[in-house]
Image (cartoon, grey):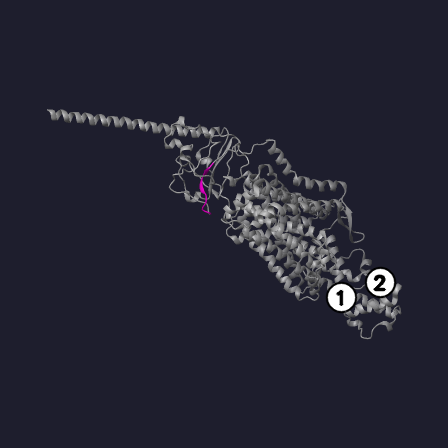
C-alpha cells in the first residue's frame, strides 16, 4: 500500500513536471516567436522610415551580389566566396510595391578579356593623329632634338602622375567620369559632365579628319595618284616664275580645290561637299559598329587598330631610309638648337603636348580603367602607356623628318636644275661672263656644292646687279626650316613626297590606312568617355546610347563638311578643347589632392593594389602638378588673348593662303564653346551647395549593402543593434533606424575575412549621409 502510494506520488510528480515543462516550452516558443516578429516589424519600419536622401558609404570590391533579408537578419554570409568581391543594392521606390525579385537585380559590369587588350586600348587612345603631325611639327619648330628634353621632363613631372591619377580613380570606383567625380565629391560632380561635353566637341571634328583620310584612301587606288598632276586652272604665271615649286603648288591646289572645295571665308558656307559628307558618314558608321556593344565589340578591333600603325611606321621608316636626301631630315631632327630650348614658348608647347598626348581630361582613360580588375597594377600601366606614347612619337618623327628630308632634297634638286638653266641662258646672252665660271664646273651634271660655288661667285661679281637675276640659293635646310603642321603635314607634305616613291599608290594606301586606324583608336576612347558615364548614371542600354550618340554627332558634324567646314575645324580645335581640358584636369587634381585627401587616396591605392605606390606621386599630386598646371593655364590664357583670333583662308585669286580674323558671330561661337564646356562645373557646385536636388536618384530611398573594411576596433556584441537575437528585450535596445546605424558581422563569427594586406576585417557597412555627408570611402 505504501509502495503504491509512493509510486502514485512519483507518477503524479512526473506528470506535473512534464506538464510544467510543456507549458515552459510553449511559453519559450511564444517568446522566441514574438521576438522574431518584433525584429521583422522593426526591420520593415526601418525600410519605410529610411530618409529620401540616404545613401551608402560604399566600400565596393567587384560586381553586385544578391542577398536575402533572411541572410541579413541571421547575420550569416550568403555566397561568401562570391561576396568577397560584391555588393548588394536594394532600391525602395515611393508608392510602388515590388517583390523581392524586382528589388534584387544583378548588374554585372563587363571587363577586359586579358591585360593585353586593356593596354592596347589605352595605347590606342593616347597614340593618335597628334603623334604623327603635331609632335614632329613642334619638334621642328622648337629646336629639333632640343625639344625632346623639355618634353621628357614634363612627361615625368605632370604627364605620368596625372595619368596614374585617372587610372586609379577609374579602377577603384569602377564608374565613368560622371560617377567617379560625383563619388569623390558631389559638389565637384560637374567635372564628369564637363569631360563629356569636351569629348563631344572633340569627337565632332576629330571624326571629320578621319573622313578626310577615308577620302584620300579611296583615291589612292589609281596610278598615277590624282594629286600628282595639277588641274588646268588659273595662275599659270605663278608656276612660270617659280617652276621648281610646281609640285608643291599642285598638292596645295588638289587639297583646297578638289578635296575640300573650300570657300574663300568662313562666312561663305557654299553648301555641303557631298564627297566629304559620304566619307564622314562612313567614319561615323565605323565608330558606331565598333562601339555598339561596348568593349566587347571594340576589343575585336583594338588589336588591328592599335598595332597596325606601328607596322606601317616601321615600313615607312625602312623605306625612307633608302631614299636620297632622307638623311638630311634625320640630321636636322637631331641637331639641337639650344637657344630655343631656353625659350618659355618651347616649354609651354611641350607641356601642352604632354597634356593632350595622354588624353587627360576626356574621361576615356577613366572609362577604360573602370573595366579593370580591382587588383590590377595601374601604377605600372601609368608608366608603360606614356613611355610607349613617347617612343611612338619619336618613331613617327623619324619617319616624318626622313620624308621631309627626301622631299626637301627633291625640291632642292629641281631648284638647282631650274637655276642652272637660267645661268646658262645668262651666259649665252652675255649677262654673265664665261670667264668667272670655274673650269671644273659641268652644267649638265652639276652638284649642289658646284652650284653653290657658282652662285657665290656670280653674287660677288655682280654686286648690286645680282638681285635682278632672280637666282635662288637652293639649300636643303631652307626647305626643312619651313614649318608644316596639322593637316598640311599629312594631306600636303606626305602626299607630295609619296608621288616620288616607287609604287606610289601602295604607299599611299598604307599611309592613309594608318591614319584611319590611328584616328579610330583615339575615337574609341573619346566616345567611351561619353557613353560610359551616361550608361552608368542613367542605366540605359549601351547599344541604344551608342547609336543615338553617333547619329546626332553625324548630323551636327555636317557643319564641318560644308565648303567652309575646314575653318570650323580650326575653330573647334583652337577653342573647344585646349583651355577647357586644362581647367578640367586642374579640378581633377584639386578634387583628389585637397578635397578627398592625398593621404586617403594613397591609402586607397595601397588597399586596391595590395602594395603602396611610390611616395614620389604623393608630392607631385599635392605640390608639383598643381603649380605646373596653374602656370600652364596662365600662359595659355595670355597666349590666347594676345594671339589674334583667326584662321588661314584659301584665296582663289592668288591661289595661296591668307590669314583672316573671325567675324563677330564666329567669336561668339568661340566663346560659347569654352563656356559650354566649363558650365557644368559651377552649375553642379551651385546645385549641391543650395540643396536644390537630392543626392539620391530614386523617389524615396536607395539602400545598398556592400562589403567594407572595418578600420575601428572589433564590434562589441552587447552594443550592437542586432542584439535582439542575443536575448535582449525590445525595451533595452534603441529604436532601430537604418539611417543612423552600422550593421557589422558579430565579433564572435567563426571566420573573419581580411583585406589583401591582412590588416582589416570585412563586414556589412551602412551609414546615413546626414551624419557623414562627405566621409570618403577609406574612412570606413
Side (left or right) of 118 relative to 68: right
102 vs 546: above or below:
above
In the rendered image, is residue 728 in sight?
yes
Q: Residues within 10 Å of mark 1 (few under 14, many from 20)?
A: some
Q: What are the residue bounds of the magenta stretch?
A: 757-765
Residue 404: percent from the left, percent from the top? 70, 61
Side (left or right) of 546 relative to 559: left
Q: Does the stretch in magenta take in 678?
A: no
Q: Does the stretch in magenta take in 759?
A: yes
In the rendered image, is residue 498 in sight?
no
Q: Say which quarter of the image contains residue 676.
A: top right
21 vs 257: above or below:
above
- Disc 2 target residue: 470
Q: Say which quarter of the image contains residue 401.
A: bottom right
Residue 64: percent from the left, percent from the top? 47, 41
Q: Residues within 10 Å of mark 2 (few under 14, many from 20)?
A: few
User: SS at mark 2?
Assistant: loop
- Disc 1 target residue: 413
Residues 90 and 388: in front is 388
Residue sitting farthest toward the bottom: 439
Side (left or right) of 416 relative to 85: right
Is tag 2's residue or tag 1's residue first in the polypeptide sequence?
1
Residues 227 and 759: in front is 759
Residue 208: percent from the left, percent from the top? 66, 49
Q: CA distance from mark 2 to mark 1?
A: 17 Å
| Disc number placed over residue 39 in the picture, else none | none
Amino acid at each position: 500500500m505504501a509502495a503504491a502510494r509512493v509510486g502514485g506520488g512519483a507518477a503524479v510528480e512526473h506528470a506535473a513536471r512534464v506538464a510544467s515543462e510543456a507549458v515552459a516550452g510553449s511559453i519559450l516558443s511564444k517568446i522566441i516567436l514574438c521576438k522574431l516578429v518584433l525584429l521583422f516589424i522593426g526591420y520593415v519600419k526601418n525600410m519605410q522610415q529610411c530618409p529620401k536622401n540616404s545613401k551608402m558609404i560604399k566600400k565596393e570590391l567587384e560586381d553586385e551580389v544578391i542577398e536575402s533579408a533572411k541572410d541579413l537578419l541571421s547575420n550569416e554570409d550568403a555566397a561568401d566566396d562570391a561576396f568577397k568581391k560584391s555588393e548588394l543594392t536594394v532600391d525602395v521606390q515611393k508608392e510602388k510595391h515590388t517583390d523581392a525579385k524586382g528589388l534584387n537585380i544583378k548588374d554585372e559590369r563587363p571587363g577586359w578579356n586579358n591585360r593585353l587588350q586593356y593596354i592596347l586600348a589605352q595605347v590606342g587612345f593616347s597614340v593618335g593623329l597628334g603623334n604623327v603631325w603635331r609632335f614632329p611639327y613642334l619638334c621642328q619648330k622648337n629646336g629639333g632634338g632640343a625639344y625632346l628634353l623639355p618634353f621628357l621632363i614634363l612627361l615625368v613631372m605632370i604627364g605620368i602622375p596625372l595619368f596614374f591619377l585617372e587610372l586609379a580613380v577609374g579602377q577603384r570606383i569602377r564608374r565613368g567620369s560622371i560617377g567617379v567625380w560625383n563619388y569623390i565629391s558631389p559638389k565637384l560632380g560637374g567635372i564628369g559632365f564637363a569631360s563629356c561635353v569636351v569629348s563631344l566637341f572633340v569627337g565632332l571634328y576629330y571624326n571629320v579628319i578621319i573622313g578626310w583620310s577615308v577620302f584620300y584612301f579611296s583615291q589612292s587606288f589609281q596610278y598615277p595618284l590624282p594629286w600628282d598632276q595639277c588641274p588646268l586652272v588659273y595662275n599659270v604665271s605663278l608656276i612660270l616664275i617659280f617652276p621648281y615649286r610646281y609640285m608643291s603648288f599642285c598638292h596645295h591646289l588638289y587639297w583646297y580645290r578638289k578635296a575640300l572645295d573650300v570657300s574663300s571665308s568662313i562666312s561663305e558656307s557654299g553648301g555641303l561637299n557631298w564627297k566629304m559628307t559620304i566619307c564622314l558618314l562612313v567614319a561615323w558608321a565605323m565608330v558606331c559598329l565598333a562601339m555598339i556593344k561596348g568593349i566587347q565589340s571594340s576589343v575585336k578591333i583594338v588589336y588591328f587598330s592599335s598595332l597596325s600603325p606601328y607596322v606601317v611606321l616601321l615600313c615607312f621608316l625602312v623605306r625612307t631610309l633608302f631614299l636620297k636626301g632622307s638623311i638630311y631630315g634625320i640630321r636636322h631632327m637631331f641637331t639641337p638648337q639650344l637657344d630655343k630650348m631656353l625659350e618659355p614658348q618651347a616649354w609651354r608647347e611641350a607641356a601642352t603636348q604632354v597634356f593632350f598626348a595622354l588624353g587627360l581630361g576626356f574621361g576615356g582613360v577613366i572609362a577604360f580603367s573602370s573595366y579593370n580588375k580591382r587588383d590590377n597594377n595601374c601604377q605600372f600601366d601609368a608608366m608603360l602607356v606614356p613611355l610607349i606614347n613617347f617612343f611612338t612619337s619619336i618613331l613617327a618623327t623619324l619617319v616624318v623628318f626622313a620624308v621631309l628630308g627626301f622631299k626637301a632634297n627633291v625640291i632642292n634638286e629641281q631648284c638647282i636644275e631650274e637655276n642652272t638653266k637660267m645661268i646658262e641662258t645668262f651666259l649665252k646672252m652675255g649677262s654673265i661672263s664665261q670667264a668667272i665660271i670655274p673650269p671644273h664646273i659641268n652644267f649638265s651634271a652639276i652638284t649642289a656644292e658646284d652650284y653653290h660655288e657658282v652662285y657665290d661667285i656670280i653674287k660677288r661679281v655682280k654686286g648690286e646687279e645680282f638681285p635682278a637675276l632672280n637666282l635662288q640659293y637652293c639649300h636643303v635646310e631652307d626647305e626643312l626650316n619651313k614649318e608644316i603642321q596639322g593637316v598640311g603635314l599629312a594631306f600636303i607634305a606626305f602626299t607630295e613626297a609619296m608621288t616620288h616613291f616607287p609604287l606610289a599608290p601602295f604607299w599611299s594606301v598604307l599611309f592613309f590606312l594608318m591614319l584611319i586606324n590611328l584616328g579610330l583608336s583615339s575615337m574609341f576612347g573619346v566616345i567611351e568617355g561619353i557613353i560610359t558615364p551616361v550608361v552608368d548614371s542613367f542605366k540605359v542600354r549601351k547599344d541604344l546610347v551608342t547609336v543615338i550618340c553617333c547619329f546626332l554627332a553625324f548630323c551636327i558634324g555636317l557643319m564641318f563638311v560644308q565648303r567652309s567646314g575646314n575653318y570650323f575645324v580650326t575653330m573647334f580645335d583652337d577653342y573647344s578643347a585646349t583651355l577647357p581640358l586644362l581647367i578640367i584636369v586642374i579640378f581633377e587634381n584639386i578634387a583628389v589632392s585637397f578635397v578627398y585627401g592625398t593621404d586617403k587616396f594613397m591609402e586607397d591605392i595601397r588597399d586596391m593594389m595590395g602594395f603602396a605606390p611610390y611616395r614620389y606621386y604623393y608630392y607631385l599630386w599635392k605640390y608639383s602638378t598643381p603649380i605646373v598646371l596653374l602656370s600652364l593655364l596662365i600662359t595659355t590664357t595670355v597666349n590666347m588673348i594676345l594671339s589674334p583670333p583667326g584662321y588661314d583662308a584659301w584665296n582663289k585669286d592668288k591661289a595661296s593662303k591668307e590669314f583672316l580674323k573671325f567675324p563677330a558671330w564666329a567669336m561668339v561661337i568661340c566663346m560659347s564653346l569654352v563656356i559650354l564646356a566649363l558650365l557644368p562645373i559651377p552649375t553642379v557646385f551651385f546645385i549641391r551647395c543650395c540643396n536644390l536636388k537630392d543626392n539620391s536618384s530614386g523617389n524615396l530611398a536607395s539602400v545598398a549593402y556592400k562589403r567594407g573594411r572595418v578600420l575601428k576596433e572589433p564590434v562589441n556584441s552587447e552594443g550592437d543593434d542586432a542584439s535582439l537575437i542575443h536575448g535582449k528585450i525590445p525595451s533595452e535596445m534603441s529604436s532601430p533606424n537604418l539611417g543612423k546605424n552600422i550593421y557589422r558581422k558579430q565579433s564572435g563569427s567563426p571566420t573573419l575575412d581580411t583585406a589583401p594586406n591582412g590588416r582589416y576585417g570585412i563586414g556589412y557597412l551602412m551609414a546615413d549621409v546626414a551624419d557623414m555627408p562627405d566621409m570618403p570611402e577609406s574612412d570606413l
